[in-house]
Image (spheres, rainbow, N blue to C red):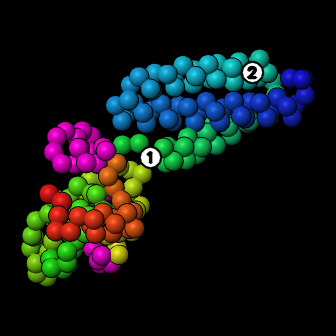
Amino acid sequence: MLDNTVVMITIILLVNVTYVAFNTIRMILTLKGRRYTAAVVSVFEITVYILGLGLVLDNLNEIENIVAYALGFGIGVVVGSKIEEKLALGYITVNVISSDPNIEFTRKLRDKGYGVTSWFAYGMEGDRLAMQILTPRKYELLLYDTIRELDPKAFIIAYEPKQIHGGFWVKQVRRGRIKSGKKAKEAVQSQPGQQGE
């Protein structure tokens, strides 16, 4: 079966796509502090790597095998990144500056389950409302949509915190208390007069 050129190219391509996808995921897991999961992934990664490299080294005289190996590497980077996007590991911190300090921004975000710290700030053109919001990465896009809904002109900066410890954020956000629009309304109606911290 491995004597067939098309089969050999396909196997080398798929093996390298798999290897590089594992490699990308392992690196991301390591950066997120998930050492043991990264170690398990690395066992599969190195096994696939040895298989793929062995196939190429045994057939170095075939240029198409080398091309398939290189192409598989590039595709693997894209595949690994897409998998990581779907896993959405970790948290994101979003700093928001609203041009209207009177918008009930903070309460509405807290009603949806986000951890929000807010304060009044002063910009070049007057008073502002500044907020720092923590959310799991899987809710990042939902948070941006919510912010733009409340204030389309809001200034948004996001970054990944290296370490999180203590406070309302960790307790509430880790419990998965982020709510979509419908769930947030139901929660507020069932607990009138109660607001987030």
Indicate whether residue 156 is drawn in magenta.
yes
In this figure, which residue is indicated by the disc labeled 2? 55
Residue 76, by quadrant, is top right
**How many neighbours does mark 2 have within 10 angstroms: few (below 14), some (14-19), or many (20 or more)?**
some
User: Is residue 190 in sight in this rendering?
Assistant: yes
10 vs 136, left or right, is: right
Q: Nearer the viewer, residue 52 or 81?
A: 81
Residue 40 image point, x, y percent = 49, 22
Q: Earlier in the sequence, mark 2 or mark 1?
A: 2
Residue drawn at (58%, 22%) of the image: 44
**Where 104 falls versus 136 (above or below)?**
below
Residue 180 image point, x, y percent = 39, 63
Indicate whether residue 128 is drawn in magenta.
no
Which range is magenta?
150-175
In this figure, which residue is indicated by the disc labeled 1? 88
Residue drawn at (61%, 30%) of the image: 19
Residue 193 image point, x, y percent = 16, 68
The quarter of the rendered structure image containing the N terminus is top right
> What amino acid does circle 2 point to?
Leu
**How many neighbours does mark 1 have within 10 angstroms: few (below 14), some (14-19), or many (20 or more)?**
some
Residue 149 image point, x, y percent = 35, 75
> What amino acid does circle 1 point to?
Ala
